Amino acid sequence: MAKLKLAIVVGSNRRESLNLKLAKALAKLGEGAFEPSFVQIDDLPMFNQDLEPNRPEPTLRLKREIEAADAILIVTPEYNRAIPAVLKNAIDWASRPYGKSSWAGKTVAVTGTTAGATGTAAAQQELRMIMTNLAGVVVGGQVFITYKDGMFDAEHNVTDETTRGFLQGFVDNLARIAGKLAA
């Protein structure tokens, strides 16, 4: 069976983002089922409907990458109990123009990490609401990951066996659901 195309959107533009580290670890855990690609969002202009008639190339690239994917994995930090502006901006660009959302019918999984005890609970809840409103098929179950130093090694492996097993189950569930919907 061919591997599913997985578009990974990291909701942070920080070079040393904890969520980028988590996303790379999840991509590695899913390499048996997925052909992962990371979607660049840090070069998108701020959404402005006036730009829609002559869309900037980065926004067209974003739409192409989302549309080509069998599944979407969004890995995001939480800023002030909400999703980061860079992520919301990407979601808005990919949902436009009205009636031509790239998110429609896509299998979407959401997770994130932070050093805080509640992980990215509020951001994940907000993302689930947004993706459901955009007609995405949101994979159930929230995945709260409290980041700890040394959680990932230099090769993007999850160092804790229990955490690795938990994250493997998350990735396997995404692959199972995306595979059914892609068939």
Image (cartoon, rainbow, N blue to C red):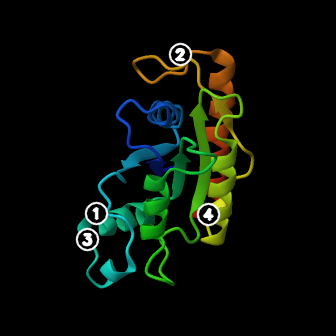
Callout 2: SS: loop
Q: Who is closer to the viewer here, 85 or 130?
A: 85
Q: Earlier in the sequence, mark 2 or mark 3?
A: 3
Identify the image quadrant of the C terminus: bottom right
Report how far apart the C-alphas of labels 2 and 1 lie in the structure. Answer: 34 Å
SS at badge 3: loop
Crowd class of label 2 (few under 14; some 14 to 19; many from 20; radius 10 Å): few
Tally of numbered tags? 4
- Residue occupied by mark 1: 58
Tags 1 and 3 touching, CB below 8 Å: yes
Q: Could you give the CA–CA distance between mark 1 and mark 3, rounded to whole angstroms? A: 6 Å
Cα separation between marks 1 and 4: 21 Å
Give residue 106's position: percent from left, percent from top.
Answer: 56, 64
| The label number, if any, that marks residue 131 in the structure image | 4
Q: Are marks 1 and 4 in contact (CB under 8 Å)?
A: no
At x 28%, y 76%, the residue is 55
What residue does disc 3 label? Answer: 56
Residue closest to the eye, 121 or 178: 121
Between 119 and 34, the one lying in front of the other is 119
Amino acid marked by disc 1: Pro
What residue did someone put label 2 on? 149
The answer for how far apart the CA atoms under marks 2 and 3 are is 39 Å
- Mark 4 vs 2, N-terminal side: 4
Residue 15, position in %: x, y?
34, 34
Q: Earlier in the sequence, mark 1 or mark 4?
A: 1
One can see residue 31 in this view: no
Residue 84 position within the rendered picture, expressed as x and y whole percent measured from the top left: 50, 50
Image: 28 above or below 124:
above
Give the mark nearer the N terminus: 3 vs 4.
3
Left or right: residue 73 compared with residue 37: right
Disc 2 marks a residue whose amino acid type is: Asp
SS label for mark 1: helix
